[in-house]
Amino acid sequence: MDKDNEALKASEEQVLYASVLMLGVLAGLAIMGLTYFIYLTGILPAHVDMNYLPQVWGKNVNEYLHLTHTPHGWEWTGLLMKGDFLNYIGFVLLGLMTVVCYLVLVRGYMRQKDWTYTAISVLEILVLCVAASGMLGSGGH
Amino acid sequence: MIKSRINMLGGQLFVLLAMLMTCPGIAAATETMVDPAISAKPWWFWPLVLFVFCLILGVLAVMAGVGGGVLYVPLVSGFFPFHIDFVRGIGLMVALAGALAAGPGLLKRNLANLRLALPVALIASTCSIAGAMLGLYLSSLNPNIIQACLGATIIGIACLLLFSKNTEKPVVTKQDAIGLALGLQGVYWDDGSQESVEWKTHRTLLGLLSFIIIGLLAGLFGLGAGWANVPVFNLLMGVPLKVSVATSKFLLSITDTSAAWIYLNRGCVIPLIAVPSIVGLMLGSFLGVRILAVAKPKMIRYMVIGVLFFAGFKALDKGLGLGLMG
Protein backbone atom coordinates (compact mmCIF):
# COMPACT_ATOMS: atom_id res chain seq x y z
CA MET A 1 0.00 0.00 0.00
CA ASP A 2 1.34 3.45 -0.94
CA LYS A 3 2.12 6.00 1.79
CA ASP A 4 -0.49 8.41 0.37
CA ASN A 5 -3.24 5.80 0.22
CA GLU A 6 -6.57 7.08 1.55
CA ALA A 7 -6.93 4.00 3.80
CA LEU A 8 -3.89 5.13 5.78
CA LYS A 9 -5.36 8.51 6.61
CA ALA A 10 -7.20 9.24 9.84
CA SER A 11 -10.99 9.08 9.64
CA GLU A 12 -12.99 12.31 9.27
CA GLU A 13 -14.27 12.23 12.87
CA GLN A 14 -10.76 11.50 14.15
CA VAL A 15 -9.37 14.60 12.38
CA LEU A 16 -12.26 16.73 13.64
CA TYR A 17 -11.73 15.49 17.20
CA ALA A 18 -8.01 16.34 16.92
CA SER A 19 -8.68 19.85 15.59
CA VAL A 20 -11.19 20.73 18.32
CA LEU A 21 -8.88 19.27 20.97
CA MET A 22 -5.91 21.26 19.67
CA LEU A 23 -7.82 24.55 19.93
CA GLY A 24 -9.04 23.75 23.43
CA VAL A 25 -5.62 22.70 24.72
CA LEU A 26 -3.92 25.82 23.37
CA ALA A 27 -6.63 28.02 24.89
CA GLY A 28 -6.43 26.13 28.20
CA LEU A 29 -2.66 26.46 28.48
CA ALA A 30 -2.71 30.14 27.52
CA ILE A 31 -5.41 30.87 30.09
CA MET A 32 -3.51 28.89 32.72
CA GLY A 33 -0.37 30.97 32.09
CA LEU A 34 -2.27 34.26 32.19
CA THR A 35 -4.27 33.49 35.33
CA TYR A 36 -1.17 32.23 37.16
CA PHE A 37 0.58 35.48 36.30
CA ILE A 38 -2.38 37.46 37.69
CA TYR A 39 -2.30 35.30 40.82
CA LEU A 40 1.45 35.59 41.47
CA THR A 41 1.62 39.32 40.80
CA GLY A 42 -1.27 39.94 43.17
CA ILE A 43 -3.33 41.86 40.58
CA LEU A 44 -6.28 40.07 42.15
CA PRO A 45 -6.06 39.20 45.87
CA ALA A 46 -5.86 35.50 46.76
CA HIS A 47 -8.51 33.73 48.84
CA VAL A 48 -5.80 31.78 50.69
CA ASP A 49 -2.78 33.92 51.49
CA MET A 50 0.33 32.55 49.79
CA ASN A 51 2.36 32.93 53.00
CA TYR A 52 -0.15 30.72 54.81
CA LEU A 53 -0.12 27.90 52.23
CA PRO A 54 3.14 26.24 53.42
CA GLN A 55 1.50 25.73 56.81
CA VAL A 56 -1.53 23.92 55.41
CA TRP A 57 -0.54 22.05 52.26
CA GLY A 58 0.78 19.19 54.38
CA LYS A 59 -2.67 18.63 55.93
CA ASN A 60 -5.23 16.32 54.36
CA VAL A 61 -7.76 17.91 52.05
CA ASN A 62 -10.57 18.01 54.64
CA GLU A 63 -8.41 19.89 57.14
CA TYR A 64 -7.08 22.14 54.39
CA LEU A 65 -10.58 23.12 53.27
CA HIS A 66 -11.65 23.74 56.85
CA LEU A 67 -8.59 25.81 57.83
CA THR A 68 -8.62 27.93 54.69
CA HIS A 69 -12.42 28.28 54.44
CA THR A 70 -12.14 27.00 50.90
CA PRO A 71 -15.32 25.84 49.19
CA HIS A 72 -15.49 22.65 47.15
CA GLY A 73 -17.49 21.46 44.14
CA TRP A 74 -18.50 24.30 41.84
CA GLU A 75 -18.68 26.88 44.62
CA TRP A 76 -15.35 28.24 43.39
CA THR A 77 -17.30 30.07 40.65
CA GLY A 78 -18.40 32.52 43.35
CA LEU A 79 -14.73 33.34 44.05
CA LEU A 80 -13.56 34.14 40.54
CA MET A 81 -12.36 37.56 41.58
CA LYS A 82 -9.77 35.88 43.79
CA GLY A 83 -6.38 35.28 42.14
CA ASP A 84 -6.06 31.64 43.22
CA PHE A 85 -9.54 30.61 42.10
CA LEU A 86 -9.10 32.41 38.79
CA ASN A 87 -6.66 29.61 37.91
CA TYR A 88 -9.55 27.15 37.98
CA ILE A 89 -10.75 28.51 34.63
CA GLY A 90 -7.74 26.90 32.89
CA PHE A 91 -8.13 23.61 34.80
CA VAL A 92 -11.83 23.44 34.05
CA LEU A 93 -11.29 24.17 30.37
CA LEU A 94 -8.85 21.25 30.17
CA GLY A 95 -11.38 19.09 32.02
CA LEU A 96 -14.22 20.05 29.68
CA MET A 97 -12.34 19.60 26.42
CA THR A 98 -13.03 15.88 26.21
CA VAL A 99 -16.79 16.45 26.63
CA VAL A 100 -16.77 19.03 23.82
CA CYS A 101 -14.82 16.66 21.56
CA TYR A 102 -17.24 13.82 22.30
CA LEU A 103 -20.19 16.03 21.33
CA VAL A 104 -18.52 16.48 17.95
CA LEU A 105 -18.10 12.71 17.72
CA VAL A 106 -21.74 11.96 18.52
CA ARG A 107 -22.82 14.17 15.64
CA GLY A 108 -20.43 12.40 13.26
CA TYR A 109 -21.41 8.88 14.33
CA MET A 110 -25.12 9.68 14.12
CA ARG A 111 -24.65 10.91 10.56
CA GLN A 112 -22.93 7.63 9.72
CA LYS A 113 -25.71 5.72 11.53
CA ASP A 114 -23.04 4.00 13.62
CA TRP A 115 -25.32 3.40 16.58
CA THR A 116 -22.86 1.36 18.65
CA TYR A 117 -20.31 4.17 18.73
CA THR A 118 -23.04 6.79 19.12
CA ALA A 119 -24.19 4.96 22.26
CA ILE A 120 -20.61 4.59 23.57
CA SER A 121 -19.97 8.30 23.02
CA VAL A 122 -23.22 9.38 24.67
CA LEU A 123 -22.51 7.15 27.68
CA GLU A 124 -19.00 8.62 27.99
CA ILE A 125 -20.44 12.14 27.96
CA LEU A 126 -22.80 11.13 30.76
CA VAL A 127 -19.95 9.63 32.80
CA LEU A 128 -17.82 12.77 32.37
CA CYS A 129 -20.75 15.05 33.20
CA VAL A 130 -21.51 13.11 36.38
CA ALA A 131 -17.82 13.34 37.38
CA ALA A 132 -17.72 17.06 36.60
CA SER A 133 -21.02 17.83 38.31
CA GLY A 134 -19.55 17.48 41.79
CA MET A 135 -22.30 15.06 42.80
CA LEU A 136 -19.69 12.38 43.51
CA GLY A 137 -16.99 12.61 46.12
CA SER A 138 -17.20 16.32 46.84
CA GLY A 139 -18.99 16.11 50.17
CA GLY A 140 -17.85 15.21 53.63
CA HIS A 141 -15.90 17.85 55.40
CA MET B 1 29.60 10.42 19.99
CA ILE B 2 26.13 12.03 20.18
CA LYS B 3 24.80 9.01 22.04
CA SER B 4 27.51 9.20 24.67
CA ARG B 5 26.87 12.94 25.08
CA ILE B 6 23.16 12.28 25.58
CA ASN B 7 23.92 9.55 28.07
CA MET B 8 26.15 12.04 29.86
CA LEU B 9 23.38 14.68 29.81
CA GLY B 10 20.90 12.14 31.15
CA GLY B 11 23.39 11.20 33.85
CA GLN B 12 23.89 14.86 34.77
CA LEU B 13 20.13 15.44 34.96
CA PHE B 14 19.91 12.38 37.12
CA VAL B 15 22.59 13.68 39.48
CA LEU B 16 20.76 17.04 39.63
CA LEU B 17 17.53 15.24 40.49
CA ALA B 18 19.33 13.23 43.19
CA MET B 19 20.85 16.44 44.58
CA LEU B 20 17.42 18.07 44.71
CA MET B 21 16.00 15.04 46.51
CA THR B 22 18.79 14.93 49.05
CA CYS B 23 19.26 18.66 49.71
CA PRO B 24 18.63 19.40 53.41
CA GLY B 25 15.42 21.38 52.80
CA ILE B 26 13.78 18.65 50.77
CA ALA B 27 15.12 15.86 52.97
CA ALA B 28 13.56 17.65 55.96
CA ALA B 29 10.26 17.85 54.07
CA THR B 30 10.05 14.08 54.10
CA GLU B 31 10.60 13.86 57.85
CA THR B 32 7.37 15.47 58.94
CA MET B 33 4.62 17.49 57.36
CA VAL B 34 4.49 20.12 60.10
CA ASP B 35 8.21 20.81 60.50
CA PRO B 36 8.50 24.53 61.39
CA ALA B 37 11.56 24.75 59.12
CA ILE B 38 9.32 23.92 56.17
CA SER B 39 6.55 26.37 56.94
CA ALA B 40 9.22 29.02 57.66
CA LYS B 41 10.38 28.89 54.02
CA PRO B 42 8.94 31.68 51.84
CA TRP B 43 5.87 30.66 49.81
CA TRP B 44 7.76 30.78 46.51
CA PHE B 45 10.48 28.33 47.60
CA TRP B 46 8.58 25.07 47.11
CA PRO B 47 6.82 25.98 43.83
CA LEU B 48 10.18 27.06 42.40
CA VAL B 49 11.92 23.86 43.49
CA LEU B 50 8.93 21.90 42.20
CA PHE B 51 9.14 23.60 38.80
CA VAL B 52 12.84 22.72 38.40
CA PHE B 53 12.18 19.20 39.68
CA CYS B 54 9.30 18.69 37.22
CA LEU B 55 11.34 20.11 34.33
CA ILE B 56 14.04 17.48 34.93
CA LEU B 57 11.38 14.82 35.54
CA GLY B 58 9.77 15.67 32.18
CA VAL B 59 13.05 15.21 30.29
CA LEU B 60 13.86 11.94 32.06
CA ALA B 61 10.29 10.59 31.64
CA VAL B 62 10.41 11.05 27.86
CA MET B 63 13.91 9.62 27.64
CA ALA B 64 12.83 6.61 29.69
CA GLY B 65 9.58 6.17 27.75
CA VAL B 66 7.26 6.50 30.76
CA GLY B 67 4.48 8.96 31.54
CA GLY B 68 5.07 11.98 33.77
CA GLY B 69 2.33 11.04 36.27
CA VAL B 70 3.87 7.72 37.19
CA LEU B 71 7.09 9.46 38.27
CA TYR B 72 5.43 12.58 39.68
CA VAL B 73 3.18 11.01 42.32
CA PRO B 74 5.68 8.75 44.12
CA LEU B 75 8.57 11.22 43.94
CA VAL B 76 6.67 14.36 44.91
CA SER B 77 4.73 12.59 47.67
CA GLY B 78 8.03 11.16 48.93
CA PHE B 79 10.22 14.25 48.77
CA PHE B 80 7.98 17.31 49.04
CA PRO B 81 5.95 18.56 52.00
CA PHE B 82 2.57 18.36 50.23
CA HIS B 83 -0.11 15.97 51.47
CA ILE B 84 -0.68 12.95 49.25
CA ASP B 85 -4.27 14.12 48.55
CA PHE B 86 -2.90 17.15 46.68
CA VAL B 87 -0.11 15.20 45.01
CA ARG B 88 -2.59 12.68 43.57
CA GLY B 89 -4.97 15.42 42.40
CA ILE B 90 -2.20 17.39 40.73
CA GLY B 91 -0.60 14.18 39.40
CA LEU B 92 -3.81 13.55 37.46
CA MET B 93 -3.86 17.13 36.14
CA VAL B 94 -0.23 16.68 35.02
CA ALA B 95 -1.02 13.41 33.24
CA LEU B 96 -4.18 14.94 31.75
CA ALA B 97 -2.44 18.05 30.40
CA GLY B 98 0.31 15.93 28.82
CA ALA B 99 -2.18 13.55 27.23
CA LEU B 100 -4.38 16.37 25.90
CA ALA B 101 -1.37 18.10 24.38
CA ALA B 102 -0.16 14.91 22.67
CA GLY B 103 -3.64 13.80 21.50
CA PRO B 104 -4.17 15.96 18.39
CA GLY B 105 -0.85 15.00 16.77
CA LEU B 106 -1.32 11.30 17.46
CA LEU B 107 -4.88 11.29 16.11
CA LYS B 108 -4.04 13.23 12.96
CA ARG B 109 -1.12 10.91 12.15
CA ASN B 110 -3.55 7.99 12.59
CA LEU B 111 -1.31 6.41 15.20
CA ALA B 112 -3.86 6.75 18.00
CA ASN B 113 -7.02 4.91 17.00
CA LEU B 114 -10.32 6.43 18.05
CA ARG B 115 -12.37 3.25 17.55
CA LEU B 116 -9.99 1.33 19.79
CA ALA B 117 -9.89 4.06 22.43
CA LEU B 118 -13.62 4.80 22.83
CA PRO B 119 -14.96 1.50 24.28
CA VAL B 120 -11.90 1.13 26.47
CA ALA B 121 -12.17 4.74 27.66
CA LEU B 122 -15.78 4.24 28.73
CA ILE B 123 -14.79 1.36 31.02
CA ALA B 124 -11.59 2.95 32.33
CA SER B 125 -13.06 6.40 32.99
CA THR B 126 -16.08 4.98 34.85
CA CYS B 127 -13.78 2.88 37.03
CA SER B 128 -11.34 5.74 37.56
CA ILE B 129 -14.18 7.70 39.20
CA ALA B 130 -14.71 4.79 41.59
CA GLY B 131 -10.94 4.64 42.16
CA ALA B 132 -10.71 8.36 42.92
CA MET B 133 -13.60 8.18 45.40
CA LEU B 134 -12.11 5.10 47.06
CA GLY B 135 -8.73 6.84 47.27
CA LEU B 136 -10.19 9.93 48.94
CA TYR B 137 -12.15 7.74 51.36
CA LEU B 138 -9.12 5.63 52.33
CA SER B 139 -6.99 8.75 52.64
CA SER B 140 -9.51 10.31 55.03
CA LEU B 141 -9.35 7.14 57.16
CA ASN B 142 -5.55 6.96 57.17
CA PRO B 143 -3.24 8.36 54.47
CA ASN B 144 -0.70 5.64 55.26
CA ILE B 145 -3.01 3.07 53.63
CA ILE B 146 -2.78 4.94 50.32
CA GLN B 147 0.94 5.55 50.79
CA ALA B 148 1.65 1.82 51.35
CA CYS B 149 -0.60 0.70 48.47
CA LEU B 150 1.04 3.31 46.24
CA GLY B 151 4.47 1.97 47.19
CA ALA B 152 3.48 -1.59 46.34
CA THR B 153 1.94 -0.47 43.02
CA ILE B 154 5.04 1.55 42.06
CA ILE B 155 7.28 -1.45 42.76
CA GLY B 156 4.95 -3.54 40.59
CA ILE B 157 5.15 -0.94 37.79
CA ALA B 158 8.96 -0.91 38.00
CA CYS B 159 8.97 -4.73 37.65
CA LEU B 160 6.54 -4.48 34.72
CA LEU B 161 8.78 -1.94 32.96
CA LEU B 162 11.85 -4.06 33.64
CA PHE B 163 10.52 -7.47 32.57
CA SER B 164 7.72 -6.94 30.03
CA LYS B 165 8.83 -7.54 26.47
CA ASN B 166 6.49 -5.70 24.14
CA THR B 167 6.09 -6.95 20.59
CA GLU B 168 6.52 -4.48 17.72
CA LYS B 169 3.97 -6.16 15.44
CA PRO B 170 2.05 -8.97 17.17
CA VAL B 171 0.61 -11.71 14.95
CA VAL B 172 -3.18 -11.99 15.21
CA THR B 173 -4.43 -14.85 13.07
CA LYS B 174 -8.15 -14.53 13.77
CA GLN B 175 -10.08 -11.55 15.08
CA ASP B 176 -12.64 -12.37 17.78
CA ALA B 177 -16.36 -11.56 17.54
CA ILE B 178 -16.29 -8.54 19.89
CA GLY B 179 -13.31 -6.99 18.12
CA LEU B 180 -15.06 -7.54 14.80
CA ALA B 181 -18.36 -6.09 16.03
CA LEU B 182 -16.64 -2.97 17.38
CA GLY B 183 -14.50 -2.61 14.24
CA LEU B 184 -11.25 -2.80 16.20
CA GLN B 185 -8.92 -3.03 13.26
CA GLY B 186 -6.93 -0.58 11.20
CA VAL B 187 -3.92 0.20 9.09
CA TYR B 188 -1.09 2.69 9.63
CA TRP B 189 2.08 3.77 7.90
CA ASP B 190 5.30 2.72 9.62
CA ASP B 191 8.01 5.29 8.84
CA GLY B 192 10.71 3.03 10.24
CA SER B 193 10.08 0.08 7.92
CA GLN B 194 8.51 2.21 5.14
CA GLU B 195 5.45 -0.04 4.85
CA SER B 196 1.79 -0.05 5.79
CA VAL B 197 0.88 -2.25 8.72
CA GLU B 198 -2.57 -3.81 9.09
CA TRP B 199 -3.76 -4.83 12.53
CA LYS B 200 -6.75 -6.32 14.31
CA THR B 201 -7.48 -7.33 17.90
CA HIS B 202 -7.97 -10.67 19.62
CA ARG B 203 -8.84 -11.54 23.25
CA THR B 204 -10.89 -8.31 23.17
CA LEU B 205 -13.22 -9.18 26.06
CA LEU B 206 -10.30 -9.95 28.38
CA GLY B 207 -8.62 -6.74 27.27
CA LEU B 208 -11.73 -4.68 27.96
CA LEU B 209 -12.15 -6.25 31.40
CA SER B 210 -8.52 -5.42 32.26
CA PHE B 211 -9.39 -1.75 31.98
CA ILE B 212 -11.64 -2.07 35.03
CA ILE B 213 -8.53 -2.58 37.18
CA ILE B 214 -6.47 -0.06 35.23
CA GLY B 215 -9.15 2.62 35.66
CA LEU B 216 -9.42 1.89 39.38
CA LEU B 217 -5.65 2.21 39.88
CA ALA B 218 -5.46 5.40 37.79
CA GLY B 219 -8.12 7.07 39.94
CA LEU B 220 -6.91 5.63 43.22
CA PHE B 221 -3.32 6.85 42.94
CA GLY B 222 -3.55 9.64 40.35
CA LEU B 223 -0.85 7.94 38.31
CA GLY B 224 -2.05 8.10 34.74
CA ALA B 225 -2.00 4.55 33.40
CA GLY B 226 0.16 4.33 30.29
CA TRP B 227 2.34 1.75 32.05
CA ALA B 228 -0.66 -0.63 32.11
CA ASN B 229 -2.50 0.41 28.94
CA VAL B 230 0.38 -0.43 26.61
CA PRO B 231 0.97 -4.06 27.75
CA VAL B 232 -2.79 -4.77 27.63
CA PHE B 233 -3.19 -3.35 24.11
CA ASN B 234 0.03 -4.86 22.82
CA LEU B 235 0.58 -8.17 24.59
CA LEU B 236 -3.02 -9.12 25.33
CA MET B 237 -5.07 -7.66 22.49
CA GLY B 238 -2.41 -7.91 19.77
CA VAL B 239 -2.29 -4.24 18.77
CA PRO B 240 1.04 -3.10 17.20
CA LEU B 241 3.33 -1.32 19.66
CA LYS B 242 3.19 2.09 17.93
CA VAL B 243 -0.62 2.10 17.87
CA SER B 244 -0.69 0.82 21.47
CA VAL B 245 1.58 3.59 22.76
CA ALA B 246 -0.24 6.34 20.84
CA THR B 247 -3.75 5.11 21.71
CA SER B 248 -2.70 4.70 25.34
CA LYS B 249 -1.48 8.30 25.50
CA PHE B 250 -4.70 9.55 23.93
CA LEU B 251 -6.76 7.30 26.22
CA LEU B 252 -5.25 9.00 29.27
CA SER B 253 -6.87 12.26 28.19
CA ILE B 254 -10.27 10.61 28.73
CA THR B 255 -9.57 8.32 31.71
CA ASP B 256 -7.77 11.02 33.67
CA THR B 257 -10.43 13.62 32.92
CA SER B 258 -13.10 11.81 34.92
CA ALA B 259 -10.80 11.09 37.89
CA ALA B 260 -9.36 14.62 37.77
CA TRP B 261 -12.86 16.06 38.10
CA ILE B 262 -13.39 14.14 41.35
CA TYR B 263 -10.15 15.53 42.81
CA LEU B 264 -10.79 19.01 41.42
CA ASN B 265 -14.29 19.15 42.91
CA ARG B 266 -12.95 17.88 46.22
CA GLY B 267 -10.45 20.77 46.41
CA CYS B 268 -7.32 18.65 45.87
CA VAL B 269 -5.77 20.97 43.28
CA ILE B 270 -3.85 23.90 44.80
CA PRO B 271 -3.05 26.31 41.94
CA LEU B 272 0.23 27.52 43.47
CA ILE B 273 1.74 24.04 43.12
CA ALA B 274 -0.38 22.68 40.24
CA VAL B 275 0.69 25.18 37.57
CA PRO B 276 4.50 24.84 38.09
CA SER B 277 4.05 21.05 38.02
CA ILE B 278 2.05 21.07 34.78
CA VAL B 279 4.22 23.67 33.02
CA GLY B 280 7.50 22.14 34.30
CA LEU B 281 6.63 18.64 33.12
CA MET B 282 5.32 19.84 29.76
CA LEU B 283 8.41 21.95 29.07
CA GLY B 284 10.59 19.05 30.20
CA SER B 285 8.72 16.71 27.84
CA PHE B 286 9.25 19.08 24.90
CA LEU B 287 12.98 19.19 25.69
CA GLY B 288 13.06 15.42 26.15
CA VAL B 289 11.42 14.84 22.75
CA ARG B 290 14.06 17.01 21.07
CA ILE B 291 16.84 15.05 22.74
CA LEU B 292 15.12 11.77 21.85
CA ALA B 293 15.02 12.72 18.18
CA VAL B 294 18.81 12.41 18.21
CA ALA B 295 19.17 9.16 20.15
CA LYS B 296 17.40 6.79 22.52
CA PRO B 297 19.52 6.22 25.58
CA LYS B 298 18.58 2.88 27.11
CA MET B 299 20.68 3.59 30.18
CA ILE B 300 18.29 6.38 31.28
CA ARG B 301 15.38 3.94 31.18
CA TYR B 302 17.15 1.64 33.63
CA MET B 303 18.02 4.60 35.85
CA VAL B 304 14.36 5.67 35.94
CA ILE B 305 13.29 2.11 36.75
CA GLY B 306 15.81 2.27 39.60
CA VAL B 307 14.28 5.53 40.83
CA LEU B 308 10.80 3.94 40.66
CA PHE B 309 12.01 1.04 42.82
CA PHE B 310 13.50 3.52 45.28
CA ALA B 311 10.37 5.73 45.36
CA GLY B 312 8.17 2.63 45.68
CA PHE B 313 10.14 1.26 48.63
CA LYS B 314 10.19 4.72 50.24
CA ALA B 315 6.40 5.06 49.91
CA LEU B 316 5.94 1.54 51.26
CA ASP B 317 8.29 2.28 54.15
CA LYS B 318 6.47 5.54 54.91
CA GLY B 319 3.04 3.91 54.65
CA LEU B 320 3.94 0.98 56.89
CA GLY B 321 5.78 3.29 59.31
CA LEU B 322 8.93 1.14 59.27
CA GLY B 323 11.33 4.09 59.17
CA LEU B 324 13.99 2.09 57.33
CA MET B 325 14.56 4.77 54.69
CA GLY B 326 14.53 7.85 56.86
Image: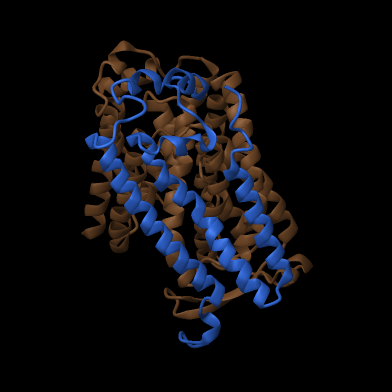
* Residue B6, percent from left and from top: 25, 53
Residue A139 drawn above or below residue B103 = above
- Numbered disc total: 0
Point 46% across, 39% down: residue: A77
Residue A116, can we see it?
A: yes
Q: Is residue B66 visible?
A: no
User: Relative to residue A83, is residue B196 drawn left or right?
Assistant: right
Residue at the (42%, 66%) spot, across then down: B105
Furthest residue in direction top, as rendered: B36
Asked whether, in this view, residue B110 is left or right of residue B11, the answer is: right
Q: Nearer the viewer, residue A17 or B76?
A: A17
Q: Colour of chain B?
A: brown
Residue nearest the viewer, comparing A76 with B69: A76
Residue B91 at what x, y percent from top left?
45, 39
Any idea which chain is the blue one in this picture? A
Image quadrant of residue B160? top right
The image shows residue B195, relative to residue B243, as above or below, that is below
Q: Residue, x 37% and y 40% (percent of image)?
A: A86
Quadrant showing the C terminus of chain B? top left
| Quadrant (top left/top right/bottom left/bottom right) for the N terminus of chain B | bottom left
User: Where does residue A12 sit, x and y in percent of width and height?
Assistant: 54, 77
